[in-house]
Image (cartoon, rainbow, N blue to C red):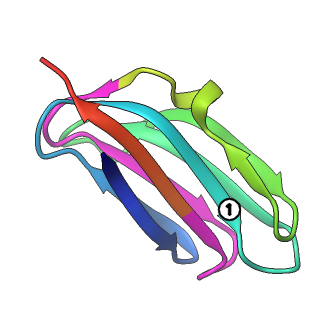
């Protein structure tokens, strides 16, 4: 199932907030612009502003896509936990996360 499909604004934003326990199975970050965009991605615990950096300051080339499968494969988020994305340019990076409910 699709957990998140959003376009990141400039700066840090919540790409996904779990409302139940889920396992992320796949994901992508896609640059919709012609210029490179610097992106970071973090898993953030409930009631925390800081997270575990999964990707830090990755230079995503123009019109390129990076698979998150190697970075997030089988990551489990409990209710209230989030995925943060930081993008250097607003409206340039599409974020798609898929997953499944997990006990």
Dividing the image into 4 quarters, which one contains the C terminus? top left
Between residue 10 and residue 49, name the one nearer to us: 10
Q: Magenta segment, which residues?
A: 76-94
**What's the residue at 34%, 37% (across, down)?**
99
Q: Residue furthest front?
A: 1
Percent across and percent down for residue 64 are: 81, 61
Q: Is residue 39 left or right of residue 85?
A: right
Percent across and percent down for residue 60 are: 81, 57
Give the quadrant of residue 35: bottom right
**Residue 79, magenta (yes or no):** yes
Dividing the image into 4 quarters, which one contains the N terminus? top left
Percent across and percent down for residue 33 are: 78, 80
**What's the residue at 50%, 37% (across, down)?**
26
What secondary structure is found at the residue carrying circle 1? strand
**Residue 72, magenta (yes or no):** no
Between residue 91 and residue 27, name the one nearer to us: 27
**What's the residue at 52%, 71% (across, down)?**
8
Q: Which residue is mark 1?
A: 30
């Amino acid at each position: 199932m699709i957990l998140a499909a959003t376009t990141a604004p400039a700066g840090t934003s919540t790409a996904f907030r779990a409302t139940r326990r889920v396992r992320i199975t796949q994901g992508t970050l896609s640059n919709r612009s012609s210029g490179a965009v610097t992106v970071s991605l973090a898993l953030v615990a409930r009631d925390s502003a800081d997270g575990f950096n999964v990707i830090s300051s990755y230079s995503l080339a123009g019109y390129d896509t990076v698979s998150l499968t190697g970075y997030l494969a089988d990551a489990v988020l409990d209710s209230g936990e989030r995925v943060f994305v930081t993008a250097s340019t607003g409206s340039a990076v599409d974020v798609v996360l898929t997953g499944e409910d997990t006990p």
